[in-house]
Amino acid sequence: MSQENRTKLNEIIATLLEVDAATIDNNTSPTTIEQWDSLNHLNICVAVEQEFGIQLQTDEMATIRNVGDLVTMLNNKDVACA
Amino acid sequence: MNSARQALATTISGLSSPPTTVEIARAIKTLSNLDAADSGIKTIRLAIASSFTFEPLVKNLTVRGYADGFRLETYVSPFGQYVQELMSPASGIAAFKPDAVVLAVRLQDACTLIYENFNALDEAAVQSICNEWINTFRQAVKSFRKQSQASILCVNYELPAYPALGLADCNTVPSQIRTIASLNRTLNEIAAETGNMHIIDVDRFTACVGRSRIVDPKLWFWGRIPIASEHQWAYVGEITRMLRATTGKARKVLALDCDNTIWGGVLGDVGKDGIALGHDYPGNAFVALQKRALDLYHRGVVLVVASKNEHTAVKDVFENHPEMVLRPEHVSCFAVNWEPKPQNLQRVANTLNLNLDSFVFVDDHPVECAMMREMLPQVLTVNLPEDPARYEQTLAQLDCFDQLAVSDEDRRRGEMYRKEAARAEFRSESDDLESFFVGLNMRVSIACNDESTLARASQLTQRTNQFNMTTVRRSESEILELMRAENTDVYTIRLNDRFGDNGIVGLAIVRKERDNAVLDTFLMSCRVLGRSVEHAFLAWIGKRMLARKATVIEGRYNETPKNKPFSRFFESWGMSHSDETADGTQRWTYALKPSAEALKIPPWIEFESPAN
């Protein structure tokens, strides 16, 4: 499950940022992918909410700096993610 | 359908409602690779001048455009520069040379004080702030019109969910709500004086969604996006709806089923006095649907009746039922017969000289709807929800009849078409239905003298009126007696199709009298008529009787006011009308031979029962 969720997360990000899912790791961030701007950050957060059935506070959105933070956030919300 | 069109249809039908962010992103990727020419859709160059962050809506808009038959090439003005972009001949919009421009300017952004500081303003201040903005806006629109003839689609201003004065707003001067409502009236005036400018009533849209729900504070404060993600699809739908209306893609014909659509119950079973129509539930729900249909008629939509029924019985209801809203003069064509509805609509289209892609078909029955979608995909088929209380809303929500304005000619259109059609009536004609039948994946099983079917068998004799050879009613114990009698068999037929199990839908009771197989009872539920199951059932019985050395199969048909559909069945199956007894019972016979044509079972019906 944990691995499946990770694959799903990578695919969401890859689809929205139009990059190859294989290139995404915990260090992927707005500094490594140019398309990851403020609006796409919002898009990613909305998509993660929709796909994993969770809610993000605006403050939580602001503290997510990279994919690793998204993974931590998911685990904190009881979505097992490797 | 070519491959591009097919890919387009598949992509669109695969979307959730509303589509998720990921679905939109994937759909964009697939759709942008389609050849627009091949997919048969029109390209529109659409510029957007907006006072808020419109970019996230563009993807929704693009996909929704495809769904509505447009490939949109879009241009979004730089953030906050909507006035300059309209006025300057050197602007990005001017260079883009759009076919249409969306002006999505919120009053909250353009005229902030009216929203954010209203209680500090007196009447004169409100007036002067409003005038200043309206003058600016009017000037911007004027100078744009001088340089471009593009359609202008202008979003109006939404009333606030929570007016600054609270409860007191409605009896205070100035009132925030009245101020904004009055600005909306001014927008209508500007539209009229500009020409080819149309107001997108976002205020109404917002009210439908819920004024307090349209904004997701997270999206607003993070990205200045004033529409919550779950409502973005509907919001852009208001834009494509307007595009459809400006390009004249409105549908023109509304074809309505009768039984359980415009009235409750099956006319053939319960009669004119038994159908539900009136002031209490469920009759009032059907009356409400009829009133909506009448509104459409007065807007220029041509009404057609498409029903499997006896023509005279339906006409009698339209002419004489006291609670009917729709009357014969509102209906251009009565396609009332026992033929498949797609054939009927095809003929109506020929008669009225209108394309089928301007037709909307409304029916409560999923199989009728599936048949229509399959055979005439260009017709917009609306399957009513299960609950009649929701019928009227379903019709009210249809935006496919949208026109920019309604003229006197529109109001008279129904009458014109009715004269043209000269009360066209549609009778039988055969057509190739085989592929539809094959697609239904029908499977039948027949049980013989099975006592577990007693209750349903008895019920079928009680309830079935139209397709019932004798309409003799029988209790469970009478049927049990027949099951146990020598030389008599009671057959029940169960039908499954790709939509699910229809249950036991038919009953036949057959008595062997020397060399004759005599049908004592033959009936089938109306729900499944016209799908060749009745032919297959009789063919199967004929074969079984042949195997038991019968040489003739014989039926005795008693005509009643309700069972006329049955009389044509014997003839179509191949029986001959031999004679008639003094009491009016018709004797129909067919000589059983192994090679007999009538005994062939249609290849699209699979038998699951022992074929003995």
Image (tube, coloured by chain):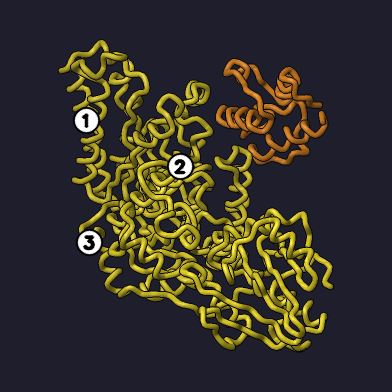
* B456 shown above or below B159: below
Pick the quarter of the image with the C terminus of chain B.
bottom right
Count of numbered badges drawn on the protein: 3
Q: Nearer the viewer, mark 3 or mark 2?
A: 2
Q: Amino acid at mark 1?
A: Ser
Report if the CB atoms under discs 3 and 2 are less than 8 Å apart: no
In the rendered image of this protein, which colour is used for chain A? orange
Mark 2 sits on what residue?
B389
Report if the CB atoms under discs 1 and 3 are less than 8 Å apart: no
Residue situated in front as seen by the camera: A34 or B286: B286
Instruction: Identify the disc placed on residue B90.
Output: none
Mark 1 sits on what residue?
B182
A65 left or right of B1?
right
B90 left or right of B503?
left
Pick the quarter of the image with the N terminus of chain B.
bottom right
Residue situated in front as seen by the camera: B487 or B92: B487
What chain is the yellow one?
A: B
Residue under the image location 70 percent in, 69 percent down = B509
Q: Amino acid at mark 3?
A: Glu
Chain identifier of the residue bearing label 2 in the image: B
Q: Are marks 3 and 2 on the same chain?
A: yes
Residue under the image location 66 percent in, 25 percent down = A54
Q: Position of residue B511 (x, y in %)?
A: 73, 74
Q: Amino acid at mark 2?
A: Ala
Instruction: Identify the disc placed on residue B409.
Output: 3
Q: Earlier in the sequence, mark 2 or mark 1?
A: 1
Q: Residues within 10 Å of mark 1 (few under 14, many from 20)?
A: few
Q: Residues within 10 Å of mark 3 (few under 14, many from 20)?
A: few
